[in-house]
Image: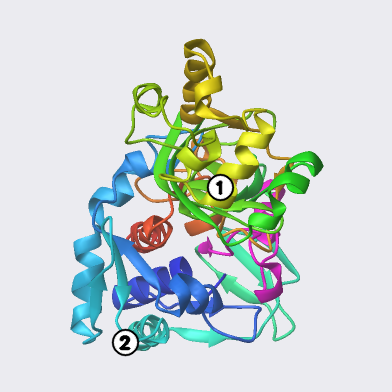
Amino acid sequence: MGAGAAGMMCAATAGQRGRRVLLIEHYDKLGEKIRISGGGRCNFTNLLASPANYLSQNPDFCRSALARYTPRDFIALVERHSIAWHEKKLGQLFCDDTALDIIAMLEAECERGGVQWRMPCSVSGVRREGGGFVVDTPMGAVHTESLVIATGGLTVPKIGATPLGYRIAEQFGLKVVPPRPALVPLAFDPEALSRYGDLSGIAIEATVSCNGGCFRENLLFTHRGLSGPAILQISSYWNGGEALSIDLLPDVDAAEWLREERASPAKLDTVLAQRLPRRFAQQWCEAEQASRPMRELDDERLCQIAARLHDWPVLPSGTLGYNKAEVTLGGVDTRELSSKTMAATRVPGLYFVGEVVDVTGHLGGYNFQWAWASGHAAAQWV
């Protein structure tokens, strides 16, 4: 159930093992999340993928699947289909042309495995019968020995995301870690928005930290708050109650630099504009009540300002929700599943793969690699 990245990978691999496979997809367009990913070029994996790049309440769970199907395995598949690709940065791999190449590749692999399709086809219910399952659809009931749930998370509901996978897990008595948006822009509170909202489009390279997560990349001001790679990454670690710590000058000893500029007749914001966008420097100095000439700032005040530049606290008011999120954090509790087979340990024949599982990757191709690896793992056992 579910013809996204994990579902198609699982179906194709199981079919090529000789299993009779039916792939059910309720949406009328195939692989939409693949199509829109990576700006339309699909950041299909990351060369650096390791368990350290994934979040889960059971962090060791992902090790087995990731070790058995690596980025190099998927690259080999891509190259067998003559899809040109390139590394952008930080191990991120993209198609040279279009994400549609990856969708066509997965379709071809399913065809090679003799996979049958029902699409678009909704699922009205799932029930246990004998040693297998019955899946009820408007196109008739399906009787099956093994059932793989690859229905994804809640991100981008306008292209078909639903909570069906979580409901099926709960129906069979499996725990679900409460889902929430991840890799998602964060919103300013009203006071911060009134001060910084007009900086939309300005980017700063910064280090952003929260709850053990720490990322150095660009952050981007938007008309609603903060986005950019650093913010999307840290959003997966933000629980809603604590401030982000933002180092605005990660390469600079701010205290030493400001002391060197102490003799300048310029105001602090003019000095900061040497290293930060001018408009931001002006707004930031006003917020910190530091819009004064450098000569009027004593050593104690300069040290306070320097400390603030390296630890600017920002408390978001919330995320921008599932419509703007790239992935869902949480999902089927991995303590209910076998890390070797992806099967529910208490429900023989029931498998969960991909985003519906409580394994969430960092930004940069890691979530696709989890889809390929978890789908491939389940396909060896269904």
Tell me the mark number nearer the camera, choosing from 1 and 2: 2
Tag 1–tag 2 contact (CB < 8 Å): no
The span picked out in magenta is: 147-171
Q: Quadrant of residue 122?
A: bottom right
Q: Residues within 10 Å of mark 1 (few under 14, many from 20)?
A: some
Label of residue 5 in the image: none
Q: Is 228 in front, or is 344? A: 228
Q: Is 88 in front, or is 258? A: 258
Q: Residue at x 63, y 30 (%)?
A: 243
Residue 283, horizontal then vertical, whole percent: 64, 43
Q: Is residue 38 magenta?
A: no
Task: Tell me how many marks there are.
Answer: 2
Query: In the figure, is residue 12 to the left or right of 298?
Result: left
Q: Is residue 166 magenta?
A: yes
Q: Quadrant of residue 381?
A: bottom left
Q: Residue furthest right?
A: 190
Q: Residues within 10 Å of mark 2 (few under 14, many from 20)?
A: few
Q: Quadrant of residue 376?
A: bottom left
Query: In the figure, is residue 89 to the left or right of 115?
Result: left
Q: Is residue 174 visible?
A: no
- Residue linked to disc 2: 112
- Residue linked to disc 1: 347
Q: Secondary structure at mark 1?
A: loop
Circle 1: residue type: Val
Q: Is 28 in front, or is 285? A: 285
Circle 2: residue type: Arg
In the rendered image, the vertical position of residue 83 relative to residue 305, given as above or below:
below
